Amino acid sequence: MLRRAIAAAIAMSAVPALAQPPAGQPPAQARPERAPPRADLPANVRVFEVPRGSRPHDVAPGPDGLIWYTGQRRGTLGILNPANGQVREVRLGEGSAPHGVIMGPDGAAWITDGGLNAIVRVDPRTDAVRTWPLPAEFPDSNLNTAAFDRDGVIWFTGQTGVYGRLDPQTNEMRVWRDPEGRGPYGIAATPSGDIYYVSLAGSHLARINRATGAATIIEPPTPNQGARRVWADSRGNLWISEWNGGQLTRYNPTTREWRSWRPEGEAPRVYAVYVDDRDFVWITDFAGNATLAFDPANERWTRYPGTGPNSNVRQILGRPGQILLPESGLDRIMVVDTSRR
């Protein structure tokens, strides 16, 4: 049963790209009618439609208030202007199926593209696309997420059992295999510059030696918990979403102490995790079809329901005063204004 559950969890995130339009033609922008967002959303929530079939997987704040998202099934980087709701798309290449997107130190969009098996950069001024394919000995790595360290090097994971780094200044790329095999998924940088990743199939946390690339496995106290994503707070604590365990877990690298909290619900499925500028911790619960904000100071939860059934928010990111939620199941982006209640 455990092997089947892990295999199903991995398959959910490996979505193939749909056929692309002929070269030189932009993706179609038609949006068939769909159900409007539910009426009981909090007052500090706005909802934006993106092109149907995009299946926005990850999202990131872009420059000048723009919002980037990966159109996993359209092979695009989507660019949403929340001031007017308009969306435009940048095609990433034939066969593209982008997963993660973050803003780099250079202000560009950096993407982990499972379809291209490459790291992709999109210039925010020109929309120019550049790709760095993984070495031939690491085909079909099922690239997932990425994080920059303090030296401007981008680190990334792949669920087939790999993690790696790319130095944009030298174009040098190195890739290593996880000590326990399949599963590397979420990855994060701490305020001190350390890089950690979690393994969904391997159910572990790992710290990367940035000089050698060696990964040191750190076993959480809950076995087979399916650690999916990880994020660091301002103190360097690591917050982990447990897909199989249905918990939010915190690890203190200094004291090596672990603690977990379980959201309400009969069988939570905790997917995403993100820590905002106030050190509130945000998670998504697929089973509850909701995003939850957790205040560690008083251990209270605030619930934000999905805008429709099976909203499937797979990743969370934000900027001061704003939380960005890509509803992959509904082709929508939800924006929460944390300066309002």
Image: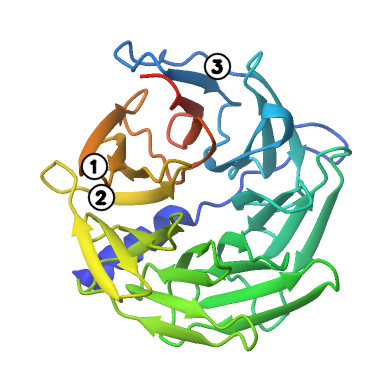
Residue 242: percent from the left, percent from the top? 29, 59
Residue 110: percent from the left, percent from the top? 70, 53
Tell me the distance, in whole angstroms, between the alpha carbons under discs 1 and 2: 5 Å
Rendered view: 268 above or below 239: above
Residue 78 is drawn in which quadrant? Answer: top right
- How many marks overall? 3
User: Mark 1 or mark 3: which comes first in sequence?
Assistant: 3
Residue 272 visible to an observer of this rendering: yes
Residue 245 visible to an observer of this rendering: no
- Residue situated in front as seen by the camera: 115 or 299: 299
Residue with the mark numbered 3 = 32
Residue with the mark numbered 1 = 287
Quadrant (top left/top right/bottom left/bottom right) for the C terminus: top left
Amino acid residing under circle 1: Ala
Dot 2 lies on which element?
loop
Residue at left offset 21%, top offset 59%:
260
Residue 288: percent from the left, percent from the top? 23, 37
Amino acid residing under circle 2: Arg
Residue at left offset 30%, top offset 37%:
292
User: Mark 1 or mark 2: which comes first in sequence?
Assistant: 2
Tell me the distance, in whole angstroms, between the alpha carbons under discs 1 and 3: 27 Å
Residue with the mark numbered 2 = 269
Rendered view: 43 above or below 25: above
Residue 284 is drawn in which quadrant? Answer: top left
Tell me the distance, in whole angstroms, between the alpha carbons under discs 2 and 3: 30 Å
Contact? badges 1 and 2 (CB < 8 Å):
yes
Residues packed near mark 3 inside 10 Å, few (<14), some (14 to 19) or many (20 plus): few
- Residue situated in front as seen by the camera: 128 or 216: 216
Residue at left offset 56%, top offset 27%:
52
| Left or right, residue 211 beside residue 21 | left
Residues packed near mark 1 inside 10 Å, few (<14), some (14 to 19) or many (20 plus): some
